[in-house]
Image (cartoon, helix red, strand yellow):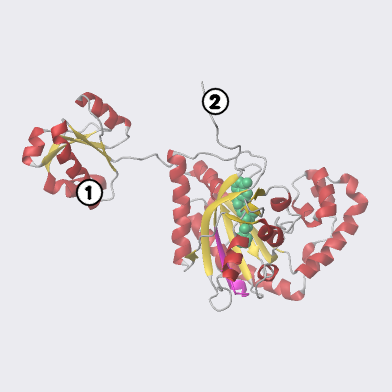
Amino acid sequence: MTEIIPSVRGMRDVLFADASRLSHIESVFRLVLESYSFEEIRTPIVEYEQLFKRGLGESTDAVAKEMYRLLDRDEKWLALRPEGTASVVRAAIQQNLCYDDRPRLWYMGPMFRYERPQAGRYRQFQHVGAETLGLEDPLSDFELIQIVTDVFSELGISSGVQLHINSIGSSDARARFRAKLVDALQPVSHLLDDDSKTRLKMNPLRILDSKVPATQVVLRDAPKLMDSLSVESKKRFDKVLNLLENANIRYKLDHHLVRGLDYYTDTVFEWIGTGMGAQDALCAGGRYDGLTTLLGGKPTPGVGFAAGIERIALLHEQMHDVERISTDIYVVAMEESHQQYALEVAHLLRSGSDVRVRQHIGEGKIKTKLRWADRSGATWVLILGDDEQRDRTVTLKWLRFKRPQETIPLSDLLTTLYAKLEF
Ligand code: HAM
C-alpha cells in the first residue's frame, strides 16, 4: 500500500463542531470589533524575514528560535508570519495610512511558530488581532481592553479569564532597569533555571516571567521594573488603570508581565485562562510607540492585541457545548422522476430561510435514502413522490422526535417551518 502523507507536526485539521466553535469565536470578535468601528485589513501570510527581525527583535524566541524561514526562488529570505502586528504596521506605512487617518484595523488569520507542540500550542494557530495607530491617549489602550472584555462576555467565558496588566515604560527606562537587573541576578545566577541563565545574557527582562518556582524565589528580592519608570510613564499607566476601574473591568497588576516581543512600550496586558495548564495565555497585547520608526515610517504611536483563537476555544469548550449541525432539512425524491420537483423545493427553502438544506443525491431504495437522511443529523426529512408532485405539497417527517407525519402545501412550507422552529 502507498504510504499515507500526514499533516505537518503541530498543524492540525479542524473539523465539524470544533470548526464551528472557532468560527463562532471569530464571528463574535468581528461583530464586537466592527461595533467599535475597526476596519478589516488582510496582509500576506509571507513577508520578508527582515520585517520580523527588525520589528520583533532578533533575539526574541519568535524570531531566533521559532520563525519559519524560506528562501524564495530569487534568493530572498522570506518568513511565514509569526504574528500580525509587524505586518499591519508595515502595511500602514506602505499604504500611507499612519499620518492622517488614525487607522483602527483588525485582522484574522493563521500565524506560524516552530514551537514544541502540545495542547493549546501549535505550529500553525489562528489570531484575531486589532491595532490602533496614531493615538497616544491612554483611552486607546483602554478601548482595546474593553473590546476583548466585551468579546469574552459575549462568549460567556468572562468567569474563566483574568486580565493581567503592567507598564514596562520607555526603552530608556527598560535599558536602565536591564542593567540593574543583571547586576542583581549575576551573583545569584547559579540559583536560576537554565533558560533564565541564557536569558541573563540574551534577554534578561524575560527572566521576570519565568514560571520556574526556584527562579521566582530569586526574583522576590530583585529590583522592580516599576521603580525604573519615568514619572510620565507612571502617570500614563495610572490613567489606564483608572479607566479600567471606572468601567468595572477587573485586573491584576502583574509586575512580572514583560511580554516576549521587543516592540512594546508602556502598557502591556494579557488575559490568562483559569485551570488551563501551561498554555493559559488567551490574548495579549500592548503599546508599541517605537515600532513605526523601527520599520522606516514616521513616528506613530500604536497599541493592539492578538487573541489565540484555539486557546479561547479550549476554555469555551470547558464552559459551553457546541453541537455539530450540518443539516436541518433533508430532501428526498422517491424516484428519479421527482428529482426536478425536489430541486425546486430545496431551492425554495434555501432562498427563503436560513435553514441548512441537503438534497439526497444518488439512486436507491427509499429505505436507504431515509437512512442517509437520519445520518445527516437533520431534524426533518421532506419526502417527495407522485402525490406531492401532482398536488404541489411536501410530506414532512420528524427524524428526532415521535411526531405525526404531515402533508403541507408548498406555498405554506416556509411559514409552517418557521412556526415549528419557534416551537
Ligand atoms: P503573542 O502573545 O505572541 O502576541 O500572541 C498572542 C496570543 O496568541 C497568545 O496570547 C496566545 O493565545 C496565542 N498564541 C501564541 N502562540 C501560540 C501557539 N504556538 N499556539 C497557539 N496559540 C498561540 C502577539 O502576537 C502580538 N502581535 C500581540 C499584539 C498585537 N501586540 C500588539 N498588538
> Which residue is under mark 1?
418
Q: Is residue 46 left or right of residue 366?
A: right
- Number of residues whose C-alpha sits closer than 10 Å to that of mark 2, classed few (under 14), some (14–19) or many (20 or more): few
Query: In the drawing, what numbered circle is on residue 296?
Result: none
Q: Earlier in the sequence, mark 1 or mark 2?
A: 2
* Residue shown at the point (54%, 25%) measured from the top left: 3
- Residue 249 visible? The answer is yes
- Number of residues whose C-alpha sits closer than 10 Å to that of mark 1, classed few (under 14), some (14–19) or many (20 or more): few
Spatial CA span between label 1 and label 2 = 50 Å
Residue closest to the far top? 1
Q: Nearer the viewer, residue 329 or 350?
A: 350
Count how many numbered circles sit on residues in the image: 2
Q: Nearer the viewer, mark 1 or mark 2?
A: 2
Q: Amino acid at mark 2?
A: Glu
Q: Amino acid at mark 1?
A: Tyr
- What residue range appears in magenta? 129-140
Q: Nearer the viewer, residue 329 or 49?
A: 49
Q: Quadrant of residue 278?
A: top right
- Residue 281 visible? The answer is no
* Residue shown at the point (55%, 57%) measured from the top left: 44
Q: Nearer the viewer, residue 137 or 132?
A: 132
> Which residue is under mark 2?
3
| Residues tagged 1 and 2 counted as in contact (Cβ below 8 A) | no
Residue closest to the far front? 74
* Residue shown at the point (11%, 41%) measured from the top left: 393
Judged from the image, the secondary structure of the residue bearing numbered disc 1 is helix
Q: Residue 268, image x and y in percent?
A: 67, 62
Q: Residue 299, image x and y in percent?
A: 67, 75
Q: Is mark 2 within 8 Å of ligand 1?
A: no
Q: Is residue 147 left or right of residue 115?
A: left
Residue closest to the far left? 390
Judged from the image, the secondary structure of the residue bearing numbered disc 2 is loop
